[in-house]
């Protein structure tokens, strides 16, 4: 998603830090699965629209992501068929078993389960997710379920503007209740909302992601929206919807199901460009905007004061009731972390008359943003992020729910850079855990090469390559899949583990 943010920063001088361009070797090099504490889980993940396909089958209705893709914004690609996991889930679970995944993170398609967004449950959607969960459980794989991953039912967007309306709180809670009631006997880990912060920026500020709203001069082709207020409103309603679902879970399900409910943040880590105090202050400000926007309400019951000061009346105020509802309403935080960017302070020169999230955030600094085919490998950034969360927010349980290397889908199964990336980042988590971080799990993004919001099927994150030219959509393990399998078997995590030929995975045949 980082590249998705880039255009929004274009009006500022970009300062690409040399640090970003280097692969920084950090932390412990040799470690193995057994070095992690008991209970720490390793898995991989995908989300519904990116892999399921069967978009028009068995009663599913379009989501805002379908609409966005069909309008041509995903490079002309869409998720109509995607990896066809809807029909191939049994084979895919077998591939997970081949790797030795302990847990699997996936999202439920709201409009497959409740086609109207609100109202009757679709029996076929219910059956599919029951089967999928059963298949995982029967193979000893722990399901971690996300309820919302960018795919709001189009019906709710049309009816009342989706996340911009307070009505979403009731409908989201009802949807969550269906999931808790139907699947909660087997699902212990629930994440309500994925990447609320960048969902709001992309969807309502620059308009580059669904539902594609923005206002001039902050986005391109803005035909509707208000970039100055809507991102703040959307996050506010997401926090309220989450907290309402959590309240319901704690009241009606926790005592019998014993599960955990968390919230996910896209957590790019911002570091100062130099040690100069202007840069240090600027980096802190960026982290408050990206991370504090979500964390402060959960821990302190309010937005960071720096944000309130910058946004004034444009950021909603929590009523006493809302603050109480939101504060303490997470059992864990899910982090999607891909890279670190550096931030440079500068004297503020231009007085902006109209402002959006970025103008509020960048009052006096430039954010160096790197759009690259591969994310710069800066594992020290993840370590620092985990330290920061521990110190600033009281060491809540954390799951790294997405971390992985972006490459181009070109058919090659030899993805050594991805192995280096995964090895380095997992090592940095072990460092943080040894230093007291309450991080409890790690999920590679992603299990399969799926649809990307902006790049369609050009970018690739998967442990498995999916041959889109093959009508069977065969999956092929990349070297990173072998590496992860060997790591999970407890073998040395270093490169020599990759080619232990005896452990080669079977090639998938459908
Ligand atoms: O594929 C996406 C995912 O849907 C959300 N987080 C970022 C990933 C990589 O771009």
Image (tube, rainbow, N blue to C red):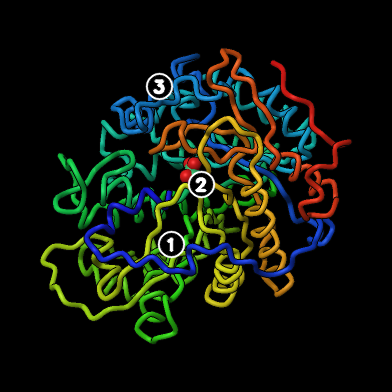
**Contact? badges 1 and 3 (CB < 8 Å):** no
| Tag 3 residue | 61
Secondary structure under the numbered disc 1 in the rendered image: helix
- Residue 369, can we see it? yes
**Mark 1 Cα-neighbour bin, 10 Å: few <14, some 14–19, many ≥20:** many
Of label 2 and label 1, which has the lower sequence position?
Answer: 2
| Tag 2 residue | 192
Residue at the extreme left of the image, as rendered: 353
Q: Which quadrant is the C terminus positioned in?
A: top right
Q: Dividing the picture into quarters, in which one does residue 498 lie? A: top right
Q: Residue 90, image x and y in percent? A: 70, 22
**Residue at image point 60% right, 27% down:** 129
| Ligand 1 lies under 8 Å from the Cβ of mark 2 | no
| Tag 1 residue | 294
**Residue at image point 62% right, 49% down:** 417
**Contact? badges 2 and 1 (CB < 8 Å):** no
Residue at the extreme bottom of the image, as rendered: 277
**Mark 2 Cα-neighbour bin, 10 Å: few <14, some 14–19, many ≥20:** many
Q: Residue 300, image x and y in percent? A: 46, 72
């Amino acid at each position: 998603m980082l590249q998705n943010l880039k255009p929004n920063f274009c009006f500022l001088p970009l300062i690409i830090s040399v640090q970003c361009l280097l692969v920084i070797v950090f932390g412990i090099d040799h470690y193995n699965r057994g070095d992690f504490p008991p209970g720490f889980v390793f898995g991989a993940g995908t989300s519904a629209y990116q892999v399921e396909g069967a978009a028009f089958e068995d009663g599913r209705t379009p989501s805002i992501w379908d609409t966005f893709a069909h309008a041509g914004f995903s490079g002309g690609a869409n998720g109509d068929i995607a990896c066809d996991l809807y029909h191939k889930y049994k084979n895919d679970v077998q591939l997970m078993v081949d790797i030795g995944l302990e847990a699997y993170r996936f999202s439920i398609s709201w409009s497959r389960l409740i086609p109207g967004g609100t109202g009757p449950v679709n029996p076929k959607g219910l059956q599919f997710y029951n089967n999928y969960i059963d298949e995982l459980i029967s193979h000893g794989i722990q399901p971690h379920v996300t309820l919302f991953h960018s795919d709001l039912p189009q019906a709710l967007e049309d009816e009342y503007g989706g996340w911009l309306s307070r009505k979403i709180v009731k409908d989201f809670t009802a949807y969550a209740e269906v999931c808790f009631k139907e699947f909660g006997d087997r699902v212990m880990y629930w994440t309500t909302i994925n990447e609320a912060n960048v969902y709001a920026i992309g969807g309502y500020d620059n308009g580059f992601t669904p539902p594609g709203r923005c206002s001039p001069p902050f986005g391109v082709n803005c035909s509707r929206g208000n970039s100055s207020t809507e991102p703040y409103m959307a996050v506010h309603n997401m926090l309220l919807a989450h907290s309402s679902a959590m309240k319901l879970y704690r009241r009606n399900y926790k005592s019998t199901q014993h599960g955990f409910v968390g919230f996910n943040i896209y957590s790019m880590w911002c570091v100062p460009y130099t040690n100069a105090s202007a840069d240090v202050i600027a980096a802190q400000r960026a982290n408050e905007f990206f991370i504090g926007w979500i964390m402060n309400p959960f821990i302190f019951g309010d937005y960071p004061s720096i944000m309130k000061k910058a946004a004034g009346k444009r950021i909603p105020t929590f009523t006493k009731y809302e603050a109480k509802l939101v504060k303490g309403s997470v059992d864990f935080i899910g982090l999607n972390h891909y890279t670190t960017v550096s931030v440079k302070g500068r004297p503020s020169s231009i007085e902006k008359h109209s402002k959006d999230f970025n103008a509020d955030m960048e009052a006096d600094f430039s954010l160096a943003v790197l759009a690259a085919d591969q994310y710069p490998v800066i594992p020290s950034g993840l370590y620092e992020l985990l330290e920061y969360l521990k110190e600033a927010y009281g060491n809540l349980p954390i799951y790294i729910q997405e971390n992985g290397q972006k490459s181009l889908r070109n058919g090659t199964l030899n993805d050594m850079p991805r192995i280096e990336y995964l090895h380095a980042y997992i090592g940095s988590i072990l460092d943080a855990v040894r230093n007291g971080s309450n991080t409890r799990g790690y999920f590679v993004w992603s299990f399969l090469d799926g649809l990307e919001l902006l790049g369609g099927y050009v970018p690739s994150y998967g442990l498995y390559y999916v041959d889109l030219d093959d009508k069977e959509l065969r999956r092929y393990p990349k070297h990173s899949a072998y590496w992860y399998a060997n790591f999970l078997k407890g073998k040395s995590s270093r490169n020599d583990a990759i080619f232990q030929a005896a452990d080669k995975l079977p090639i998938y045949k459908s």
